[in-house]
Every structure is written in structure tokens, then in C-alpha cells.
Image (cartoon, rainbow, N blue to C red):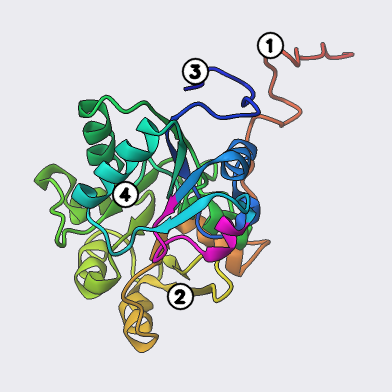
Amino acid sequence: MPESQSTSLPSSLSAGVYLVGAGPGDPELLTIKAQKLLMQADVVLFADSLVPRQIVEMVRPEAEVVRSANKTLEELLPLMQAWVQQGKAVVRLQSGDPSLYSAIHEQMQALAAAEIPFEVIPGISAFQAAAAKLKVELTVPELVQTIILTRISGRTHVPETEELASLAAHRASLCLYLSARHIQEAQSKLLQHYPPETPVAVCFRLGWPDERIWLVSLSEMADLSQREQLIRTTLYVVSPALASAWERSANTARSRLYHPEHSHLFRPKVPSAD
């Protein structure tokens, strides 16, 4: 198994499991390392309900491609173990970035317990793709400097200390995952602290061929979701920073980093001529 510090991949991969972030859906948003792994793997295991088929089209012809949407972890683990014991390199494609809502924790625990070597390769998350599509920065100086990635309680319960209304009190750029089925409740909690006119980007299947993005006010978020029958694969970005997506000239605040009056180690302040 290559070390995590390695900057290049061998021409023939070591046997093991590679947990690869597939990004939100666009094959061109894969990392170079993810592409190399896909092109060299012996087996590619992917969640076909969350990862577009186009991404696995780059695997080599002799590689085995296995869909996992209809399988449990208890079914997948023996398969991965058998492949690795046969000396095969297995790519397990995860949607988005593996560190966010990917059910990767239990996979890593099971792989470690079975003494199966594995490596994690990060990917682009949906909130990053959304900001790029909308041409906005989610941390605007003097407006908002914090990004919260969260979800509302559903089948998976959110800890009481991370209850949505309490997070909304920060009025940060809040990215709401896995919440479309409970969007009316989510909207009510968010409205306890955000003004009803706060801009919201409703992003459906980002990076997929049928991607759709709506910009609405927070007070319209639930109605839109219900009207468009959005029940899954939807990200909500709630942020005052989105105002610039409506009116590009509305916000003139700028970062100090590249300001001519801001000096730092690599750009010392030029003494005044006076």
C-alpha cells in the first residue's frame, strides 16, 4: 500500500482498499490521484445511486466494476477482503468528499479490524461545487467568516449540542446536507435566527447532467423544495454571501490579503515617499 505522503502512484498498485472521493458528480472534478487510481485499479466498487456512471467509464477494460447501492457493509466487507487477499487493488468510490456524510467511519473500522490495508483520497464536496457554480465566496470580509456544514435530524440523529436552530444563531454560511425530506422543519428552525429574506441556493444533483440550482429567499425554501419534489441529493446553502449572486455590485467588501495597504512576510510594506 503506498504511503499517504507519497506524491506519485506506482505503475502497479499495491493490494488494498482505496476509499476515493468521487466529488459531487462532475468527472472533471476528480483529483489527479483519484483518476490514476481508477485507471489502475483491479476492482472498482461504487455507490451507483450517488456516483454517476460517467466517472467509472475511465477504468481499464479488464477491471471489475461492482455496484454497491443494494449491498450492506456486511456484504461488502467479505468481498473487499477476498479481493485484497487475491492481491487486487480495490477502489471504493464515495460521493463527494469521504470526510463528510459518506458512512466511511464504519468502513474504516471494519477494514482495520479485518487487517485490510486502506488509504483515503479526498474529493471535492458539494458545498465547494455550489460556491463555484454560483460564483461566490462563502467567507466575505465584514459580512460572514464562518462556514457550517450540517444536517437536520432524520434517521441519523444529530447530537443535541448541534441542533439546527442553535447553529443558525451564528448566521454563518450554513450548508445543509441530507435534509430535503425534512425541509419544512429545517426552514422553521433557520427562521428563528436568519431573516426571512436571507438568500438560499437550492442545489439539486450538483455536477450531474440534470443538475439544477435555484436562488430563493429562506422563506421560500420549503415551498420550492416541495413544488420541485426534491427529496434527496439536494444541498441547501444559506448565506448572506449569496446576495452577490443576485446583485454583483451590491457588496464591495474585499479581503485584506491582496489589498495594497496590507503587508506580510512575502510582500513587505513599501515606505512612503513623503
Among the two numbered marks 2 and 3 on one chain, the one whose residue lies closer to the N terminus: 3
Among the two numbered marks 3 and 1 on one chain, the one whose residue lies closer to the N terminus: 3
Q: Amino acid at mark 3?
A: Glu
Residue beneath label 3, please?
A: 3
Q: Could you tell whether 197 is left or right of 105 in the image?
A: right
Disc number placed over residue 101 in the picture, else none: 4
Density class for disc 1 (Cα within 10 Å; few <14, some 14-19, many ≥20) is: few
Q: Amino acid at mark 2?
A: Val
Q: Are marks 4 and 1 in contact (CB under 8 Å)?
A: no
Q: Amino acid at mark 4?
A: Tyr
- How far apart are the two marked residues, 3 and 1, measured between alpha carbons? 33 Å
Instruction: Residue 79: give x, y in percent of width and height.
Output: 31, 45
SS at badge 2: strand
Q: Amino acid at mark 1?
A: Leu
Instruction: Residue 231: give x, y in percent of width and height.
Output: 31, 76
The correct choice, above or below, for 74 with respect to 195 in the image is above
The structure residue drawn at horizontal position 46% and vertical position 57%, both measured from the top left corner, is 240
The structure residue drawn at horizontal position 38% and vertical position 39%, both measured from the top left corner, is 83
SS at badge 1: loop
**Mark 4 or mark 2, which is nearer to you?**
4
Residue beneath label 1, please?
A: 265
Residue beneath label 2, please?
A: 216
Among the two numbered marks 3 and 4 on one chain, the one whose residue lies closer to the N terminus: 3
